[in-house]
Image (cartoon, grey):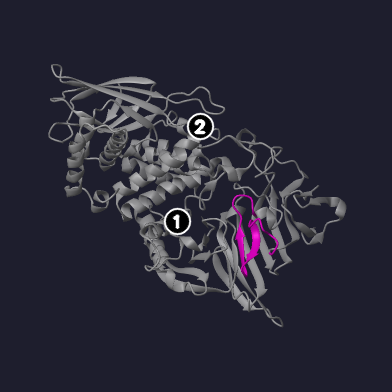
């Protein structure tokens, strides 16, 4: 974490770089304590930049060896260099090549950012700002360049040399005990997606053919002796690739997809283009030692990192304030994948439990922040439950509001319009607006306002008028920097459950926009009147947990037990069960005899025997 004197970065101060980096050529001469990095950048002055404007590149603990432009070594007065920065005072007017030679020490790099050596394996971690520990560069996500990487190393200790993209060349270096490999990534990417791995690793491989017939080599590299524990991760990868083709229309775009799993990787996993790097706990599993949760965790993380190939890599974020654009969206995608592969109700419940236990407290504490923040001192502090988990809920709400077809149209337009871009939340929402001819400006408050909305619901039935009235009220407490809150656009999926357990139909509705089983709560207070309700219903609100809010209703214990037995929404059946069980346990602990205890137990038994519910849900605790 940076000190309190660190510079405050603000979204409102965003500006494009004065120069564009079109191509990057990197040569790594790997040595444990003195790796030489030769970086050749093809740069051009951006339109609007003054001729001769200084070129200022980021660094971190770098040792500079030399600087040259168009092969001419610069005089010392032509530039200023420190471990943190390289400034070329007066670059050429138009396009030029900047060659920078630096030295780094992978052995002593205990930050595990940039290039480091651990347990004999060279590895990189560049998100969020680790590339500047390798060479001087515009180390920011909106600088997208085409990378070619040559890796040279001792062949005996580093027989495997891996980089981003497709392999182009590999040979022994004549007269030495070293060899090299060249990798080329044709897709422009930011520096945080750069990756390099070198070491003595074992590999398991499989062939994959995309929906359009493109062959892809899949490889999982692990420390020797772990090869027989990669079957499940390979299976998860193949299923992830097929699912993304089917559900989002996204095919893989390189000739190879490599995963490296090592015990020394300091993060869970990283989606580097074509070369995902994992901590091996998210890759290795065998039936003798791994639990069901281990298998589920591997499946989720493998899918998440693969899905980043499009939502994060092909389309990245303009600056780190847009982090939810890649992380929240990709969490939603991995949640949907797991829901399709396993039990959708159980997955939804598990995700909501995670949200309430991790993100809701964050929303209520001193570190509460919007899903799209507007300032930071240290970007690593924004890899939070709010950005990831609540960010995923916002994407889910968009799908809830638009429906599956409208959501897919918006996503298709997003991929078409912004492939190869560094984008923003505004770009993302605009695609759904344009694809569906609607205005999401009110909904966008979810990205800008922090805090968890509190929703109160009170229902009443008028038998003579055959109406059911639902009074709704929303309120969001003040959070740091946001004392006043505007009302959110809250999509509430609902059902009015009749005496026989079926949802009752209504003839008309007043007081809110209602589309089938979806109610739009858009004001501080709304009174919604449903006409043509022939019998008293029990309202089932916030089905599928359709918005990340806290809901308080006036349902009686008898109503909750009724929903346990009859609600067509598994999530609300589970929620009613949890609410009642908590109440009953508190009363029993206080020495009371809870009302409705026997009916509650009978309702539990009814759920266990209900063949309309999937087995995983019926067995879920």
How far is the residue under mark 1 from the one under mark 2? 28 Å
Residue 51 appears in the picture as rendered? yes
Q: Compare residues 398 and 91 and report the one nearer the observer.
A: 398
502 above or below 196? above
Residue for point 75% across, 59% down = 100
- Looking at the picture, tell me which residue is in the foreground, 448 or 411: 448
Task: Check contact, mark 1 vs mark 2: CB within 8 A.
Answer: no
> Label 2, on which residue?
448
Mark 1, Cα crowd under 10 Å, few <14 / some 14-19 / many 20+, is many
In the rendered image, which quarter contains the N terminus? top right
Badge 1 element: helix
Give the image quarter of residue 197. Answer: bottom right
Residue 405, percent across and down?
Answer: 32, 43
Q: Position of residue 578 (x, y in %)?
A: 30, 39
Q: Is residue 467 left or right of residue 616?
A: left
Task: Please report the residue visible at 36 percent of the width from the left and 53 percent of the height from the top.
Answer: 338
Task: Nearest to the eye among marks 1 and 2: give it.
Answer: 1
- Name the residue that disc number 1 marks: 301
Q: Residues within 10 Å of mark 2 (few under 14, many from 20)?
A: few
Highlighted range, magenta: 107-130
Q: What residue is shown at x 62% (from left), y 78% (from top)?
A: 171
Extreme residue in the top direction: 464
Q: Secondary structure at mark 2?
A: helix
Q: Position of residue 583 (x, y in %)?
A: 30, 34
Mark toward the start of the polypeptide (1 vs 2):
1
Q: Position of residue 268 (x, y in %)?
A: 51, 56
Specify whether 305 is left or right of 30: left
Residue 156 - label: none
**Residue 313 located within the stretch drawn in magenta:** no
Q: Is residue 292 left or right of residue 96?
A: left
Residue that appears at 18% across and 48% down:
612
């Amino acid at each position: 974490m940076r000190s309190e004197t660190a510079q405050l970065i603000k979204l409102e101060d965003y500006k494009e770089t004065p120069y564009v980096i079109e191509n990057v050529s990197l040569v790594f001469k790997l040595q444990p304590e003195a790796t030489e990095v030769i970086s050749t950048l093809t740069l051009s002055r951006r339109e609007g930049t003054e001729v001769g404007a200084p070129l200022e590149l980021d660094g971190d603990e770098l040792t500079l060896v030399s600087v040259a432009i168009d092969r001419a070594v610069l005089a010392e007065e032509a530039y200023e260099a420190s471990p943190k920065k390289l400034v070329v005072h007066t670059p050429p007017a138009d396009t030029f090549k900047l060659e920078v030679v630096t030295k780094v020490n992978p052995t002593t790099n205990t930050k595990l950012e940039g290039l480091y050596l651990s347990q004999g394996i060279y590895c990189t971690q560049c998100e969020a700002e680790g590339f500047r520990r390798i060479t001087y560069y515009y180390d920011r996500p909106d600088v997208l360049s085409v990378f070619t990487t040559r890796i040279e190393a001792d062949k005996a200790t580093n027989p495997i040399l891996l980089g981003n993209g497709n392999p182009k060349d590999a040979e022994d270096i004549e007269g030495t005990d070293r060899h090299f490999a060249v990798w080329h990534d044709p897709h422009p990417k930011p520096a945080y997606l750069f990756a390099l791995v070198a070491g003595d690793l074992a590999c398991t491989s499989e062939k994959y053919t995309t929906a359009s017939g493109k062959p892809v080599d899949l490889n999982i590299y692990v420390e020797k002796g772990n090869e027989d524990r990669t079957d499940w991760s390979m299976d998860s990868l193949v299923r992830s690739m097929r699912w993304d083709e089917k559900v989002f229309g996204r095919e893989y775009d390189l000739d190879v997809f490599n995963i490296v799993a090592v015990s020394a990787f300091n993060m869970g996993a990283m989606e580097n283009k074509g070369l995902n790097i994992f901590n091996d706990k998210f890759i290795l599993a065998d039936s003798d030692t791994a639990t069901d949760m281990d298998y589920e965790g591997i499946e989720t993380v493998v899918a998440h990192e693969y899905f980043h190939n499009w939502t994060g890599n092909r389309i990245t974020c303009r600056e780190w304030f847009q982090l939810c654009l890649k992380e929240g969206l990709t969490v939603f995608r991995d949640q949907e994948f797991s829901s399709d592969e396993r039990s959708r109700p159980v997955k939804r419940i598990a995700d909501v439990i995670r949200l309430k236990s991790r993100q809701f407290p964050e929303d209520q504490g001193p570190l509460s922040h919007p899903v799209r923040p507007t300032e930071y001192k240290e970007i690593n502090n924004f890899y939070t439950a709010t950005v990831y988990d609540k960010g995923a809920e916002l994407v889910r709400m968009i799908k809830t509001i638009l429906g599956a077809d409208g959501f897919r149209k918006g996503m298709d337009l997003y991929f078409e319009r912004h492939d190869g871009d560094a984008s923003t939340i505004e770009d993302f929402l605009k695609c759904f607006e344009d694809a569906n001819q609607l205005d999401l400006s009110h909904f966008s408050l979810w990205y800008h306002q922090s805090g968890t909305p509190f929703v109160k619901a009170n229902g009443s039935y008028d038998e003579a008028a055959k109406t059911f009235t639902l009074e709704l009220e929303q309120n969001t407490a003040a959070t740091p920097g946001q004392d006043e809150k505007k009302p959110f656009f809250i999509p509430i999926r609902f059902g009015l459950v009749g005496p026989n357990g079926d949802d009752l139909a209504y003839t008309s509705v007043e007081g809110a926009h209602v589309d089938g089983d979806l109610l739009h709560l858009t004001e501080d207070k709304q009174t919604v009147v449903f006409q043509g309700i022939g019998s008293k219903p029990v309202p089932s609100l916030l089905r599928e947990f359709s918005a990340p809010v806290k809901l308080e209703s006036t349902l009686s214990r008898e109503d909750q037990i009724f929903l346990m037995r009859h609600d067509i929404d598994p999530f609300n059946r589970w929620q009613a069960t949890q609410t009642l069980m908590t109440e009953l346990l508190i009363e029993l602990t206080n020495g009371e005899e809870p009302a409705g205890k026997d009916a509650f137990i009978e309702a539990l038994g009814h759920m266990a025997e209900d063949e309309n519910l999937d087995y995983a849900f019926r067995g879920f605790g």
